[in-house]
Image (spheres, rainbow, N blue to C red):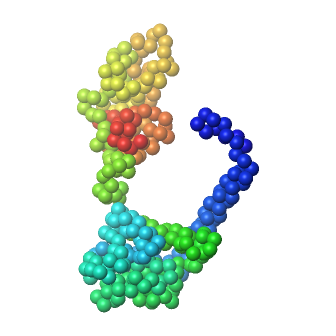
Amino acid sequence: MPRIKHNLVETISPKAEQESANLIASAVRTMDYETDGLNALRTALQDGLGKPFALAVSLVRESKGRVIVTGMGKSGHVGTKIAATMASTGTQAFFVHPSEASHGDLGMIAYEDVILALSWSGETVELENIVDYSRRYSVPLISITSNADSTLARASDVALVLPVVQEACPHGLAPTTSSVMQLALGDALAIALLESKGFTASDFRAFHPGGRLGAQLKHVREIMHSGDKLPLTSVDKSMAEAIVVMTERSFGCIGAVDDQGTLVGIVTDGDLRRKMSPDLLSLTVGDIMTPDPIMVTPDTLVSGALETVNSMSITALFVVEDGRPVGIVHIHDLLRVGAA
């Protein structure tokens, strides 16, 4: 089986091809195990796990403090991500390493906080001190574990007991399927809290001002061109006059307004090419324009404007309020702010 690499034709030996097939099969098998784990978790949430899950959400939502996430090993790595997801979606949270907690970081935990402890076995020795601390000072404790009879589950105010499934690791040792299930349940907690609090995209933006995500969470009013920069003309103007305005504004289009200032049509560079004729310049804008142009409002998220531009295969959008044009956004503006 030939392949091209760096303009050179190489041949894959039958042995290498078989090895490649085995690796792909291994990857698919891993995905199958982890999918089975997620399906088992989904079934559990619709059955016995649902009630404690709802209790956990209520406990966190009604708390006046923060969520202190803790866990050891792979559960700790998953816990770090859960804390970050909660913090970015309106639930104050941070991760405390259980070993560091035993050496002074217990002082980070306040009485009004809620502890979320992760341990697949529920018998993680390093969690002992932080669990004892929660019981001594009545700090609410939620656990995510697979063992309902474990020390951690029995000590918890709410125990989220995950179904026991087979790890993707062929030796059943490396946390794989179990880690995916812990992460999924943590995401479910974060999103349930987000929705129950009415956390909006605008709230989300406050925690994500940078990068592409931050750019997409801006509002159109923040990036649109307005005032004298708007390419506008009336429907009864000649195309000769309209083309001059189109050329000056350089947006590749011009909006047509009626006597009340309402945007009723648009003329684009494509319209000019499609309707090119000897008498083009003597025609009016109303003769050439495409009626009912696609529009957005100033409060539209940039992500929404980007979706419109992409789905409709256009390069510019007029921004209107009460039907009157107040701005225009070009695809170059979306690129400039990093949204596209």
Res 133 → quadrant: bottom left
Residue 183: % across, % down: 47, 69
Q: Residue furthest right?
A: 14
164 or 104, which is in the foreground?
104
25 or 85, which is in the foreground?
25
Residue 21: % across, % down: 69, 55
Residue drawn where x is 52% and y is 84% of the image: 147
Residue drawn where x is 51% and y is 70% of the image: 179
Residue 80: % across, % down: 39, 68
In the rendered structure, the answer to whether residue 207 lies left or right of residue 287 reads: left
Q: Against 229, is 73 above or below?
A: below
Q: Residue furthest top?
A: 278
In the rendered structure, the answer to whether residue 172 lies left or right of residue 156 reads: right
Res 32 → quadrant: bottom right
Quadrant containing the C terminus is top left
Residue 316 in sight here: yes
Quadrant containing the N terminus is top right
